[in-house]
């Protein structure tokens, strides 16, 4: 455990880089830094497919002085005294200048939409609390893709939760009017994963997807390396 006292969100952000893996998989739960389970391949596939689907919508709906954009794994302060900070897979913002939040470790404004993937066991078991935390912050809608069940839940701030199966289409016109994607496509494995090309550099597709996502999603600032934190499973 990093400290015997409760940390504030700001203190956590300041020393996150001193944690193992540069703090990449750490969150702050009730004042204590917690080591979360790293995302698996199913998580990565889900995020990649949603990133590619959202990019054209963002480009179409963004303007010079006002943009709709997303930040991967930006910290959200969902409660105070003691502080809790979650790092969902994707946070969509619709206020301020383009990519105003992109270099922040902790968000300074409230996202329009949160996408939190229910992949690892610690996230799956705690997803109801996480979702309520986002909504209490003022987020208008939360999407919870479940790569294991191949379904997506839409949890709006006002209204009933909607559960979508793989044969259905994800539409959330209250936050992203005109956007849609088949649920099955969210979890589909890209063809180039199962059909490697001869003499192809295995890093090339990753580099392309990383650069492509940054052009629309902004840079992912995860600059953080050497103390210990409590694993989520040990809580």
Image (cartoon, rainbow, N blue to C red):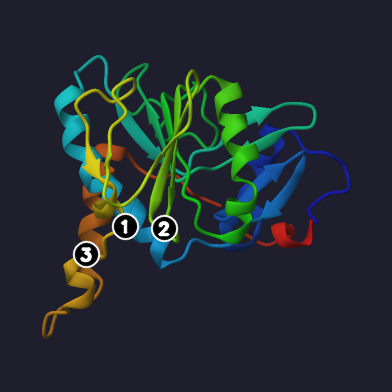
Please provide percent x and percent y for residue 119: 50, 57
Please provide percent x and percent y for residue 70: 35, 35
Q: Residue at x 69, y 43 (%)?
A: 28
Residue 43 occupies which quadrant of the picture?
Answer: bottom left
Looking at the picture, tell me which residue is in the foreground, 112 or 10: 112
Q: Residue at x 17, y 70 (%)?
A: 192
Q: Is residue 97 above or below residue 161?
A: above
Asked whether, in this view, residue 167 is left or right of residue 8, the answer is left
Residue located farthest toward the right when viewing the structure as drawn: 4
Q: Residue at x 49, y 39 (%)?
A: 74
Looking at the picture, tell me which residue is in the foreground, 158 or 18: 158
Instruction: Indicate the secondary structure of the residue bearing disc 2.
Output: loop
Mark earlier in primary sequence (1, 2): 2
For the N terminus, give its image quadrant: bottom right
- Count neighbours of disc 2 (C-alpha within 10 A) and say few if under 14, some if 14 to 19, many if 20 or more: many
Please provide percent x and percent y for residue 78: 63, 29
Please provide percent x and percent y for residue 150: 38, 56
Q: Which residue is mark 2?
A: 147
Instruction: Indicate the secondary structure of the residue bearing disc 1.
Output: loop
Q: Is residue 164 above or below residue 189?
A: above
Q: Which residue is mark 3?
A: 190
Instruction: Indicate the secondary structure of the residue bearing disc 3.
Output: loop
The alpha-carbon separation of the residues under discs 3 and 1 comes to 9 Å
Q: Is residue 47 visible?
A: yes
Mark earlier in primary sequence (2, 3): 2
Looking at the picture, tell me which residue is in the foreground, 233 or 28: 233
Number of numbered discs on residues = 3
The alpha-carbon separation of the residues under discs 2 and 3 comes to 14 Å
The disc at residue 187 is 1
Q: Residue at x 48, y 26 (%)?
A: 160
């Amino acid at each position: 455990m990093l400290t015997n006292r409760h940390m504030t969100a700001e203190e956590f952000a300041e020393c996150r880089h001193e944690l193992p893996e540069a703090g990449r998989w750490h969150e702050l739960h009730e004042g204590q830094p917690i080591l979360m389970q790293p995302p698996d391949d199913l998580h990565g596939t889900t995020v990649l497919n949603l990133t590619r689907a959202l990019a054209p919508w963002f480009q179409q709906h963004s303007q010079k002085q006002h943009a709709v954009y997303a930040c991967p794994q930006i910290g959200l302060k969902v409660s105070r005294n003691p502080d809790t900070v979650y790092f969902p897979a994707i946070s969509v913002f619709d206020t301020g200048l383009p990519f105003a939040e992109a270099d922040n470790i902790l968000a300074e404004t409230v996202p329009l939409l949160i996408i939190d993937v229910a992949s690892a066991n610690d996230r799956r078991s705690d997803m109801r609390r996480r979702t309520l935390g986002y909504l209490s912050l003022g987020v208008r809608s939360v999407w919870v893709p479940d790569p294991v069940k191949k379904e997506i839940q839409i949890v709006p701030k006002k209204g009933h939760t909607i559960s979508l199966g793989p044969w259905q289409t994800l539409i959330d016109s209250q936050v992203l009017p005109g956007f849609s994607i088949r649920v099955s496509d969210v979890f589909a494995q890209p063809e180039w994963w199962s059909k490697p090309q001869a003499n192809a550099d295995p890093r090339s597709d990753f580099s392309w997807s990383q650069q492509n996502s940054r052009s629309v999603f902004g840079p992912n600032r995860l600059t953080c390396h050497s103390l210990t934190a409590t694993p989520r499973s040990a809580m």
